[in-house]
Image (cartoon, helix red, strand yellow):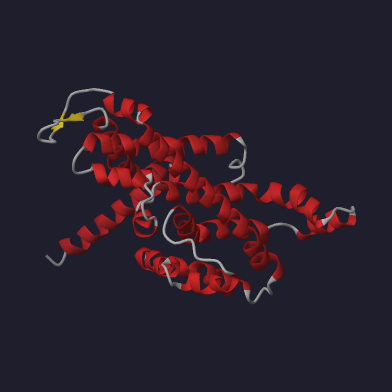
Amino acid sequence: MTVTAPSAGRGSRATVRRLAGVLHRHPGLRLSALLTAPLLWLTVLYLGSLTALFVSAFWTTDAFTSEVVRVWTADNFRALLTTPVYRQVVLRSIGVALAVTALCVVIAFPLAFYTARVARPRRRPLLVVAILTPLWASYLVKVYAWRLILSEGGLADWMLRPFGLAGPGFGLPATVLTLTYLWLPYMILPIHTALEQLPANLLDASADLGAGAWRTFRSVVLPMVLPSVAAGSVFTFSLSLGDYITVQIVGGKTQLIGNLVYSNIELNLPMAAALGTVPVVVIVLYLLAVRRTGALSSL
């Protein structure tokens, strides 16, 4: 026993060394070994669930028992295209996602410019932490905080009352404001990174050539920051398009596509699956549109 145990240990160490040598000589094999598990997870769970969602969208339900009937039909998608309510909800959801994205861009640019180019270098990490701080709070806590702000007699009413105005209350504007607050850090951070990496001599050269602030922004800053804006817009657009909890809390009677999916899960699962395919298709089309502009080529 005292002889075989060390030999077994040496044998296992030799096997490990031989395996390490094989992986070192074959980088492709090493990369395949590293990516096998995450790719398997992506294929089986993520793409598999999307496939199940798309397949179940072609089923139907029994009108009496609400049980799923596995009979292939395109009635769910036909209803999405022909029913005015569904078309309105889809268009409203896309409009809300675009409005949130536009507001995030407008608000993020001056904030990111200050944190990246104006603030002192010692303060920049603190400002970045301040931008990230809202992400550490609970999603529901932030949404309910906005519900208190926008409610009747809340902070918004108190601030606007001296000007003879009232807060927006609950509805579509409240939904857009709340979603903008929730996803704003996802737009600020990539723009901050792009502006921080922007060479200062380009701005100096533009000023030396007689360009004003707006011309410099339009001709120098914006083309270099556009890929980061596109990257941030992917987050703000997709997260806003698929959100349904915020609408339930601050949206009043407003309905977005996520609410329709949630309300149809119990009674009409195939219709909920058909509705769920709409955000997937819209986001894919949005990514293709952003890619065609060339904004993602340098990411």
- Residue 41 showing in the rendered view: no
Apparent side of residue 215 relative to residue 50 in the rendered image (left or right): right
Image coordinates of residue 189 in percent, x first then y, are 56, 60
* Towards the viewer: 59 or 294: 59
Please report the residue visible at 21 percent of the width from the left and 64 percent of the height from the top.
Answer: 6
As drawn, 121 above or below 282:
below
As drawn, 57 above or below 199:
above
Apparent side of residue 116 relative to residue 39 in the rendered image (left or right): right
Please report the residue visible at 38 percent of the width from the left and 42 percent of the height from the top.
Answer: 32
Q: Quadrant of the N terminus?
A: bottom left
Q: How many marks?
A: 0
Image coordinates of residue 27 in percent, x first then y, are 45, 43
Image coordinates of residue 144 in percent, x first then y, are 37, 67
Task: Examine the image and state in which quarter residue 87 appears.
Answer: top left
As drawn, 15 above or below 161:
above
Task: Examine the image and state in which quarter residue 126 appears.
Answer: bottom right
Apparent side of residue 240 relative to residue 294 in the rendered image (left or right): left
- Residue 79 showing in the rendered view: yes
Apparent side of residue 213 relative to residue 193 in the rendered image (left or right): right
Q: Residue furthest left?
A: 65
Image coordinates of residue 89 in percent, x first then y, are 39, 40
Task: Examine the image and state in which quarter residue 261 appears.
Answer: top left
